[in-house]
Amino acid sequence: MKKIFLTIALILSVSTAFAQDWTPLFNGKNLKGWQKMGGNATFKAENGAIVGYSTMNTPNTFLCTTENYGDFILEFEFKVDDSMNSGVQFRSQSRVDDGNTRVYGYQFEIDPSPRGWTGGIYDEARRGWLNAVTMNKAAVDHPDSKAFRNGIWNSARIECVGTSIRTWVNGIPVSDILDDMTMKGFIALQVHQIGDEANAGKTVAWRNLRICTKDVEKYATPENTCIPQVNCIANTLSEREVADGWKLLWDGKTTNGWRGARLDDFPKKGWKIEDGILKVMPSDGAESANGGDIVTTRTYKNFILKVDFQITDGANSGIKYFVDPAENKGAGSAIGCEFQILDDQRHPDAKLGVNGNRTLGSLYDLIPAPTDKPFYRGGFSTAMIVVEGNHVEHWLNGVKIIEYERNTQEWNALVAYSKYKNWNNFGNHEEGNILLQDHGDEVWFKNIKIKEL
């Protein structure tokens, strides 16, 4: 009887697999159904595969489907030469910039470099990295456990169902994001621009491209809660975030939960809420001299804080924590540890301090952020601050850039040589308010959320 049930189950599973309606995107012979956009790199149909050849002095080049797709499951195999970077666009679109066609939208990253972000999701020509894979250790942490295998054919799967976008590399789940910016578009194969003549003529190849657009939800892979999910939908919490203990620190609409650092209420001027964005408005560049800093109405001890921010040219601001708003009675900003927000290229503060400890992402005036930090000029970047007891971390766009220990002899010595040397017990408070700084420059904030640990 047991064998009968096993046989029936096998038959059902096989029949279900065959019932899935796959459509090939490549006929194995020529590039019918595809069109080239962007640069002048070359694509050829060779030995049952589409092969892209890198070319000097040309921008990113894309081979795009002539059809658009909304909800789908896409599978393909890919192989890439060393030193090449590539990707597969999906739900993508095009625009004309200065007379040139520019492809933009979601991209499944192909990355053979030691960084190992293959399967990550990049928003080409728009917002940058949506999921850089740095939090998914099964995909990138150790060479023996990486999903991607260099020098051979790799399999890939992309599932787009509504606002859910997920990727797999060689059967290993890599990315899981929620986003609603673009719900339909073409699929495209990328040959990345190159700056080194030694890489001219190197290749990236794709084969066995097939897509399912019918009953997509039925055939979608069950949710895997073991890998991180990134919610890119502005000022919302996903079901997983709620279950995991995350809360919105700003609701995207009102001033609830915030007040002026030196006020009982929210400032009457200097701050503006517009289209789901909290904006500190420009004045004269002075520190906390217009609307003034704003702080949370309650204090926090151990937490993970995420804040999306966008700076205007030459802007200065900051995210502070362990703040006691009553501590500074004089001019200037409230006192606390600061994740610096700064236009390093255009603001003079970047050249002050010691060894760059006043640059973007730094623990202001104390610990410098690395110069190769991932920052998205012209768009939103994500700051994350992790506090567990005395251990603190700064993250920028999914990459850890600073970590330190408070309440130690080394910490106190560091403070003693900083601008905070005269503030009693600086940075060692058990808890404090969280602050967004008014430094007289226009800076935008959204997706402010916190998880208490």
Image (spheres, rainbow, N blue to C red):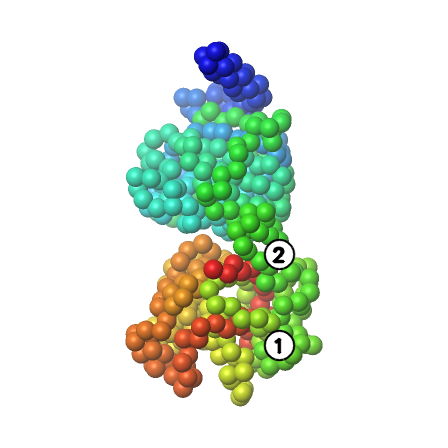
The front one of 350 and 318 is 318
Instruction: Give the residue at x 45% y 33%.
Output: 156
Q: Amino acid at mark 1?
A: Gly
**Badge number at residue 235:** 2
Q: Residue at image x 69%, y 65%? A: 254
The residue indicated by pointer 1 is 260
Residue 18 location in percent, x, y? 54, 17
Q: Is residue 431 visible?
A: yes
Above or below residue 226? Residue 152 is above
What is the residue that sits farthest to the bottom in this orientation?
330
* Count of numbered tags: 2
Mark positioned earlier in the residue sequence (1 or 2): 2
Q: Secondary structure at mark 2?
A: loop
Q: Nearer the viewer, residue 334 or 431?
A: 431
Numbered mark located on residue 32 in the image: none
Q: Where residue 248 sits in the image (x, y, percent)?
A: 59, 59
- Label 1 – label 2 distance at C-alpha: 21 Å
Q: Amino acid at mark 2?
A: Asn
